[in-house]
Image (cartoon, rainbow, N blue to C red):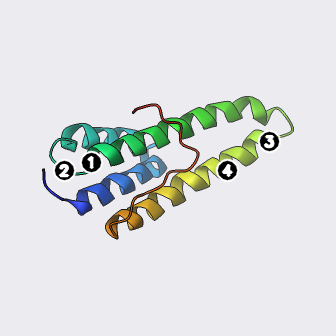
Amino acid sequence: MREDNQMLVLTHLSQLLDLVTGIGGFIVPLILWLTQKDKVAGMDFHGKMIINFQISMFIYSLLCIPLIFLFGLGIIALIGIAILMVVIPIVNAIKVSNGEIPNYPLTIEIIK
């Protein structure tokens, strides 16, 4: 296995493709994780964190739909989720480039 912080940073930043394509922020990290987890040190750990974060944010977004009809609380929650989905990958990419361990808050551990 090789050390490749640039690949790990790229994997974290690839989540931002959701802004452009809608689903690319899930597909690209998934492909990078599945193809590189045996080649890059730490990719398995980071890939699982990213995929769990993406799935968790999707679940939270689905839960917000019924809340929209309840005094508009779902819209506020969706705005918060959108902010998290932009800020957290950038912060974690910076952490990885500095050699620190990233942290994804509010993540449900689905893939272990």
Distance between mark 4 and mark 2 Cα atoms: 34 Å
Is disc 4 placed on a helix, strand or loop?
A: helix
Of all residues, the one furthest to the right in this rendering is 71
Is disc 2 placed on a helix, strand or loop?
A: loop
Q: What is the x, y in percent for residue 84?
A: 58, 54
Closer to viewer: mark 1 or mark 3: 1
Q: Which residue is mark 2?
A: 40
Q: For the image shown, how many numbered marks are present on the structure?
A: 4
Is disc 3 placed on a helix, strand or loop?
A: helix
Q: Neighbour class for label 4 at 10 Å: few (<14), some, many (≥20)?
A: few
- Three-letter code for the amino acid on which mark 1 is drawn: Met
Distance between mark 1 and mark 4 Cα atoms: 30 Å
Residue 90, quarter of the rendered image: bottom left
Closer to viewer: mark 3 or mark 2: 2
- Three-letter code for the amino acid on which mark 4 is drawn: Ile
- Circles 4 and 2 in contact, beta carbons < 8 Å: no
Q: Which residue is mark 3?
A: 73
- Circles 3 and 2 in contact, beta carbons < 8 Å: no
Q: Neighbour class for label 1 at 10 Å: few (<14), some, many (≥20)?
A: many
- Three-letter code for the amino acid on which mark 2 is drawn: Val
The one of 79 and 92 positioned closer to us in this rendering? 92
- Circles 1 and 3 in contact, beta carbons < 8 Å: no
Q: Neighbour class for label 2 at 10 Å: few (<14), some, many (≥20)?
A: some
Q: Which residue is mark 4?
A: 79
Q: Please tell me which of labels 3 and 2 falls first in the chain.
A: 2
Q: Which residue is mark 1?
A: 43
- Circles 4 and 3 in contact, beta carbons < 8 Å: no
Q: Is residue 33 left or right of residue 51?
A: left
- Circles 2 and 1 in contact, beta carbons < 8 Å: yes
Q: Which residue is painted at 38% across and 64% down in the image?
A: 100
Closer to viewer: mark 4 or mark 2: 2
Q: What is the x, y in percent for residue 53?
A: 48, 43
